[in-house]
Image (cartoon, rainbow, N blue to C red):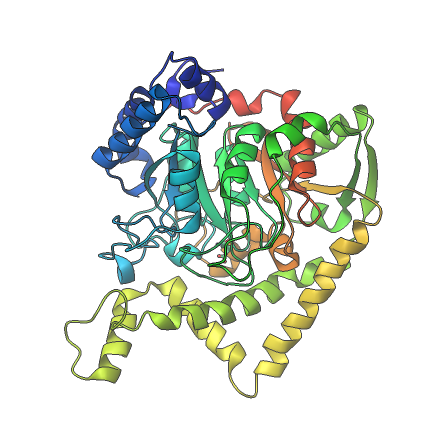
Amino acid sequence: MSSELFYQSITSLAAQLAAKKLTAVELTQAVIARTKAVDSRVQAFNSYDEADALAQAAASDSRRAAGQARGPLDGIPIGLKDVIAVAGQPLTASSKMLANFVSPYDATVTRKLKEQAGAVVWGRLNCDEFAMGSSNENSAFRPVRNPWDLTRVPGGSSGGSAAALAAGEAIATLGSDTGGSIRQPAALCGTVGLKPTYGLISRYGLIAFASSLDQIGPFARTVEDAALVLGAIAGHDPLDSTSFQAPVPDYRSELAAKKGPWKLGIPKEYFAEGLDPEIGAAVEAAIAFYKKQGCEIKEVSLPNTQSCLDTYYIIATAEASSNLARYDGIRYGHRSKSATDAIDIYAKSRAEGFGAEVKRRIILGTYVLSSGYYDAYYLRAQKVRTLIRQDFLHAYKEVDALLTPTSPIPAFKLGEKSDPLALYLCDIYTIGVNLAGLPAMSVPCGFTKSGLPIGLQLIGQPFQEANLLAIARSYEQAHDWHNQHPSL
Ligand code: GLN
């Protein structure tokens, strides 16, 4: 474990805070200093407010001095993807459309982190515009760079959340995952990333991309840290009607209790053409590890895998075209200065405010919903979505969880993939999970010969995050990948 404060885990820092060997202000200062030292190269932050973070940290220290510390996250700096609202702070979705927007309220996850857990909410992290992308190059402001190799992408769309954590600019971060946007950047930056079951976490205050797919989730240095953050943000919220009504387990203590061995499925469709051989070998080694631990390994089939990409790009774009209709230059965001009447305000504001990928999605989504095409595309995609979910539920009759690579390729060079389709293929192993509403995570499982991180994806059963975390933890405890850091 690194001795640098900014590279330590929440559990380690929480112990030092509890023992009064460290203050939240000292920790926050270390994270701020690290951010100032490296972020001109990493470009993970869209904005941050030092004074505000230090004030939150000072409040945490006063609580602790009064014997009122709120638990392991109290005083821990946690960065948020710039699609999650923080009252009084900018909220841009990395879009020109919202470049000057300040959020009037906190998202539910923000409120829970601040008020219930006592965390220091630290900065707003760069991402692909409106969370659409797999490389962070769609940010309207600047791309994020991968801390392991600054000439490469960090993945996306939550690239800033992954890169900031990997670079020591936060102790944990939150991202959002609609088709892989937490797991894929976690894999490319060598962090843990968890996309919870649809409905586990409130999306109130999350800028909507595709509402039947979007979930918020944590990036963390260790599986246990991810369990802690998950526990702090999960649970029913009357402000999000899709949030599930069920008690939130204590994920950390469940981690200790669940020991396996588990039955693990290997979906054969996920090991086909297009998988980088070094990633394939790292994932095979992880499978061999589980086998040695006494887990039963079974090949399973998810026959509709080949339809996932098409289905996703119909449903996600349809929902995006509807969600993004609100950016009309009147109620929210950018308003064109050259517009002359109401229709002109809509047209010009949207033309000027949205980037190329966002426009592409709106056009695609409007097309698949238009009369005459609705049945042929949107309705059919909904039916295929049901088949995709059934594939997973069928596999879960035989196994507890699935093991796959997270991304078919390691971090690629900035600018290397200019064809949108080539970028859409980055999500080939992650989008089925969103269509099926399942929980899944990426954990570090090695490095390529050129030193780029590799991620192992574990896919769990609905609302069985505790099992999923325990399976991931058993791998992490026997490996040292998560303790390695980029030299910046
Ligand atoms: N890369 C996918 C897309 O561009 C997923 C994005 C996400 O999960 N937010 O839509």
Foreground residue among 380 and 360: 380
The percent coordinates of residue 266 (x first, y second) are 76, 43
Looking at the image, residue 339 lies above or below residue 250: below
Report the residue at 66% width, 37% height from top: 466
Q: State the count of labels.
A: 0
Q: Quadrant of the C terminus?
A: top left
Foreground residue among 281 and 443: 443
Report the residue at 39% width, 33% height from top: 118
The percent coordinates of residue 90 (x first, y second) are 26, 50
The percent coordinates of residue 31 (x first, y second) are 32, 26
**72 to the left or right of 94:** right
Looking at the image, residue 257 lies above or below residue 321: above
Report the residue at 60% width, 54% height from top: 245
Foreground residue among 478 and 285: 478
- Residue 230 seen in the current view: yes
Q: Looking at the rendering, which quadrant does residue 36 occupy?
A: top left
- Residue 148 seen in the current view: no
Q: Looking at the rendering, which quadrant does residue 198 occupy?
A: bottom right
The percent coordinates of residue 71 (x first, y second) are 47, 28
Looking at the image, residue 380 lies above or below residue 176: below
Q: Looking at the rendering, which quadrant does residue 160 occupy?
A: top left
